[in-house]
């Protein structure tokens, strides 16, 4: 499926009409590991990296980062729900990812967005948890980061969504993957090490939340 451009008119219509109600649903409480280095104001040209609790994660981050257009990587299963819905997903910024093929067009599109100063949202687990257990991070995010100058902003959500619940979100300090890389031309082993490092960064945010939530 060919990637398509964002429909800014549609995106802002969705935000202006849907976000007020979504905020009542999420009632997000935001924590920062280091408020001097991070806030809701994302750096220009960055990768938003988060764990994946629910399909509602997309909506949560549209609310939290209201003023930023986030191009989320979205799986083929969502785009296969009909042409109209696929057009809607592209319109609000979705980047098509087919997990069943070796089509890496989503990586090229992501790098293009980042090089233009945009924001790409990635859930590196690639799928929703089963039985409450998440999945290992896929290396795609590492490849994207290494082929751009974008920093990675790690985020953790507890997925506590509902009318009578309150979602807690931790925003970590930006990561420069190039500073973490030990090789000029990293091999598969180094890529896997870096991916595990990114996974640990998000796990650290979960621990931070458990120790600091009030």
Image (cartoon, grey):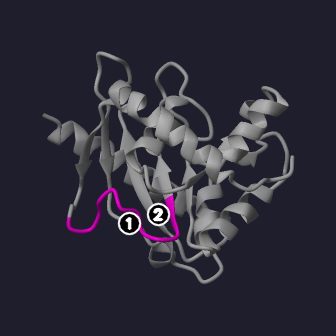
Residue 154, percent from left and from top: 41, 55
Residue at 12% in and 34% down:
214
Q: In the picture shown, does residue 191 fall above or below 203?
A: below
Residue at far bottom of view: 184
Residue at 41% in and 27% down:
21
* Most foreground residue, 80 or 82: 82
> Badge 2 local density, few (<14 within 10 Å), some, or many (20+)?
many
Image check: 123 left or right of 112? Answer: left
Tell me which numbered mark, 2 or 1, is placed earlier along the sequence: 2
> Is residue 141 in the magenta section?
no
Residue 88, percent from left and from top: 71, 38
Residue 195, percent from left and from top: 54, 57
Q: Are marks 2 and 1 in contact (CB under 8 Å)?
A: yes
Residue 80, percent from left and from top: 81, 30
Helix, strand, or loop for circle 2?
strand
* Most foreground residue, 214 or 146: 214
Give the magenta part as a residue range: 36-47
Residue identifier under label 2: 152
Residue identifier under label 1: 174
Residue at 50% in and 33% down:
134
Residue at far left of view: 214
């Amino acid at each position: 499926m060919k990637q398509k451009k964002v429909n800014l008119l549609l995106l802002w219509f969705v935000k202006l009409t849907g976000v007020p109600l979504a905020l009542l649903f999420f009632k997000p409480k935001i924590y920062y590991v280091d408020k001097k280095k991070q806030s809701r104001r994302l750096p220009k040209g960055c990768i938003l990296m988060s764990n994946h609790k629910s399909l509602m994660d997309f909506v949560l981050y549209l609310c939290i980062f209201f003023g930023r257009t986030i191009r989320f990587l979205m799986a083929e299963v969502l785009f296969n729900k009909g042409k109209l819905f696929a057009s809607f997903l592209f319109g609000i910024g979705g980047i098509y990812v087919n997990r069943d093929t070796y089509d890496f067009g989503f990586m090229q599109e992501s790098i293009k967005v980042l090089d233009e100063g945009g924001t790409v949202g990635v859930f590196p687990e690639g799928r929703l948890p089963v039985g409450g257990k998440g999945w290992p991070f896929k290396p795609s995010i590492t490849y994207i980061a290494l082929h751009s100058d974008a920093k990675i902003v790690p985020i953790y959500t507890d997925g506590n969504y509902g009318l009578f619940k309150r979602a807690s979100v931790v925003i970590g300090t930006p990561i420069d993957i190039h500073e973490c890389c030990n090789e000029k031309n990293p091999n598969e082993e180094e890529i896997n090490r870096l991916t595990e490092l990114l996974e640990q960064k998000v796990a650290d945010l979960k621990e931070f939340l458990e120790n600091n939530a009030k």
